[in-house]
Image: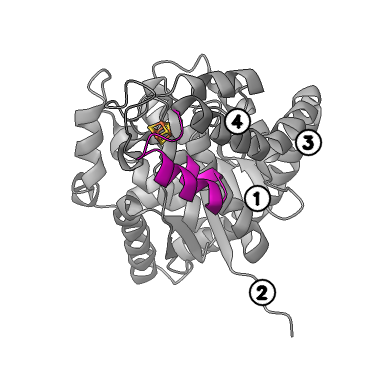
Amino acid sequence: MKQRKRRMLSGMQPSGRMHLGNLLGALDNWIKYQQDYDAYFFVADWHALSTNYADTSHLRDYIREMLIDWLSAGIDPEKCTLFIQSRVPEHAVLYLLLSMITPVPWLERNPTYKEQMEELRDRDLTTYGFLGYPVLQSADILIYKADVVPVGVDQLPHLELTRELARRFSNLYKAVFPEPQPLLTEVPKLLGTDGRKMSKSYNNAIYLSDPEKDVREKLRTMVTDPARVRRTDRGNPDICPVFSYHKIFSEIGVIDRVNTECRTAEIGCIDCKKWVADRMVRRLEPIWTERQKWTKHPKKVEAVVTEGSEKAGKAARQTLEEVREAMKI
Ligand code: SF4
């Protein structure tokens, strides 16, 4: 008998164009997961409001760009359910109901709550929505009765809250929700062109939507081992961000060659960067081709998320029926 695929749920906040760090850190995993799981992937636009409520002017553009990047990178709507959180209002209903049974100290002890307050000092995060966003996350997961949620180590406390809420709901009313299991995912940290972590806010990112000439230019001007000033200076690939790209994108023979010949100054940085640029371009070319197709046909993108959101809504409504029955409302 064919076994039911386990259901997985994962989402991303719409932050605009995706960069290589997002591709390697999240999207590549999603592409694998869509084969093995009954995968639900969503644009978490309500979550974006928890920290960016004051400026929503780019939100629609960000959602569109992100969806185009997902589809172009290989997220296949035939294999997964792709939707936008705000198109499935059942998330908000479950969020409200769960918030009634969530003790405030559970939220206040969330380690990322204080961390983010510290980090994002430029905005007022003393809002009810920001404190309660882990409850919204729980609603996102529980409304689909997800069996598995891919998480990085830093997200584990959030998933634990979801599991606690599922248990609390069972104790108070009736067992409706399975406790979702974490699928620990290693997110390789990709360096940006300035050697810091690749991030949109550092202006050091290579985007999936960058044209070839921009990708090559970003690599050409990328920082290297700072001690290697002249061509004749010996370099140290271990501290060179370009070498970290070779280790991801190049063939083993090239990696070995760079690792040896940088140290003896047999190769120069210009050639070394060109080799990795060639590999990166080869990796990005199919994405660029797909991107052109999706960009030219925004109605197709819309059709994909409309269909996905309807399917998600159907599953969400079923769960909500059980919740209402359990709570006698
Ligand atoms: S040769 Fe390559 S690895 Fe060595 S310092 Fe230059 S760019 Fe970095």
What residue is rendered at 67% in x and 32% in y? 68
Estimate the spatial distance between the alpha carbons at disc 2 and disc 4, rounded to whole Å.
Answer: 34 Å
What residue is rendered at 56% in x and 40% in y? 85
Q: Quadrant location of ligand 1?
A: top left
Q: Looking at the picture, which amino acid does disc 3 mark? A: Ala
Q: Which residue is mark 3?
A: 303
Q: Position of residue 128 (x, y in %)?
A: 29, 33
Camera-near label (2 vs 1) is 2
Q: Position of residue 148 (x, y in %)?
A: 49, 64
**Mark 4 near ligand 1 (CB under 8 Å)?**
no
Q: Which residue is mark 2?
A: 4
Tag 2–tag 4 contact (CB < 8 Å): no
Mark closest to the chain's N terminus, 2 or 4: 2
- Was residue 261 drawn as part of the magenta stretch in this picture? yes
Disc number for residue 208: 4
Q: Looking at the picture, which amino acid does disc 4 mark? A: Leu
Camera-near label (1 vs 4) is 4
Is most of the magenta stretch helix, strand or loop?
helix
Mark closest to the chain's N terminus, 2 or 3: 2
| Nearest the eye: 295 or 40 | 295
Task: Please indicate whether residue 37 sits to the left or right of residue 189 in the image.
Answer: right
| Nearest the eye: 236 or 17 | 236
For disc 3, the neighbor class at 10 Å (few under 14, some 14 to 19, many from 20) is: few
Give the secondary structure at mark 3: helix
Give the secondary structure at mark 1: helix
Does residue 207 appear in this view? yes
- Was residue 57 drawn as part of the magenta stretch in this picture? no
Camera-near label (4 vs 3) is 4
Q: Which residue is mark 1?
A: 312
Mark closest to the chain's N terminus, 1 or 3: 3
Estimate the spatial distance between the alpha carbons at disc 4 and disc 3, rounded to whole Å.
Answer: 22 Å
Q: In the image, which residues are magenta?
A: 246-268
